[in-house]
Amino acid sequence: MEKLRVGIIGCGGIANGKHMPSLAKIKEVEMVAFCDIIVSKAEAAKAKFGTPDAAVYEDYKELLKDETIDVVHVCTPNRAHSFITVDALEAGKHVMCEKPMAINSAEAKKMLDAAKRTGKKLTIGYQNRQTNEALYLKQEAMDGTFGDIYYAKATAIRRRAVPTWGVFLNEQEQGGGPLIDIGTHALDLTLWILNNYKPKYCVGTSYHALNNQTDTGNAWGNWDPEKFTVEDCAFGFVVMENGATIYLESSWALNTLEVREATTSFCGTLAGGDMWDGVRINGVRNGRQYVMKPSMSAGGVAFYDGDSSGDPSTREARQWINAILKDKDPCVLPEQAYCITQILEGIYESAKTGEIYRFDK
């Protein structure tokens, strides 16, 4: 049986919570190298997930010198995504990079160009595509159930759930706050289901309205106002080239009871769909309005070479590894992730300038 040799660059929370446990479930994978600037984290990852002879590195460039490594997973803070991914592709590795693709579109374009130049596969970690709800709605959209979708709402709203660990609050390292962290998932789901990756212009707003509070009621304890340098919420109004409208809302801290994360809702000429209570599809049939709610508790069909059951992170890893072994496109194409980065950048820029951001400039 062919085994893919995988190296992990960045052995922090997302690697331990998602990437390494998911890869460990795939028999065609062996994790043979671990890198982190805090070497003890790489050593701990090796002990838990690595082969007996797995290597540990402090410098990712040393890991990339190992010509036997087939695949690299980049699980670092956002600022490092681009240059590590480009170096890994140039070193002949296929790359799974955790979301977002990069902190801006220029850096994302470097990744996209490197993938095209080297012929190696590149994908970005948008595992929410692999939920039962997302897969069902995607299939319905492909079947033409909704007709032409012309309005959608991408939602990633937390009431008081600001991540207080790592570098999440550091704009230099992350490139932004909830918009680039969780808003990116909601936007990805929306664009994917709509199959629409051609933005025309956008207007954005962002707020530092709650950053300075100290008695916060936060899910993970009070944040440090001095370290909270990113926005606490951001919103975008995006118009696509075909006239479709997308409203994107994101927050880590917002005084609201309408809390939903990584969800989408949309309206088409034949029907509408949402993820607000499992899956709901609404329309008119035989002169009567209807709401259809399929059961999401049973197993579904395999999709994009993923598993028909299991958690989204495992499905994501499964389809990614299958894409390499079978020389097929991964579910998340780098061109799609590049478009997401462009839109996020446009919203941030519009919020900063107070002007419309046009993507054809």
Image: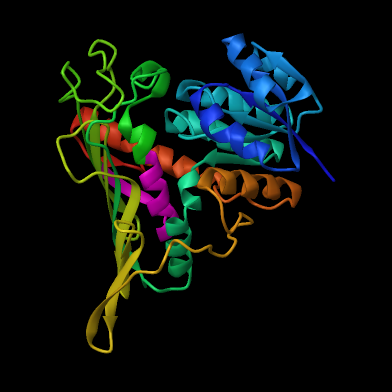
Q: Give the range drawn in magenta.
A: 184-202
Tell me: residue 185, above or below residue 169: below
List the single residue furthest toward the bottom.
286
In front: 358, or 254? 254
**Left or right: where does residue 210 sit relative to residue 93?**
left
List the single residue furthest toward the right.
1
Q: Which residue is drawn at 66% across and 24% down?
A: 48
Q: Which colour scheme is used?
A: rainbow
Q: Position of residue 325 (x, y in %)?
A: 75, 48
The quadrant where residue 182 appears = top left
Tell me: residue 67, above or below residue 100: above
Q: Does the stretch in magenta take in 135?
A: no
Q: Residue at x 40, y 23 (%)?
A: 174
Q: Where is residue 96 in the image (x, y as percent from the top left)?
A: 60, 36
**Left or right: where does residue 64 sit relative to residue 199?**
right
Tell me: residue 203, above or below residue 214: below
Question: From where the camera sits, is residue 36 visible?
Answer: no
Q: Does the stretch in magenta take in 190?
A: yes
In front: 327, or 38? 38
Question: From where the camera sits, is residue 154 visible?
Answer: yes
Q: Which residue is drawn at 38% across and 19% down?
A: 165
Q: Where is residue 247 in the image (x, y as percent from the top left)?
A: 25, 49
**Left or right: where does residue 202 sit relative to residue 141?**
left
**Left or right: where does residue 32 sit relative to residue 219?**
right
Quadrant in the picture for the C terminus: top left
Tell me: residue 45, above or below residue 185: above
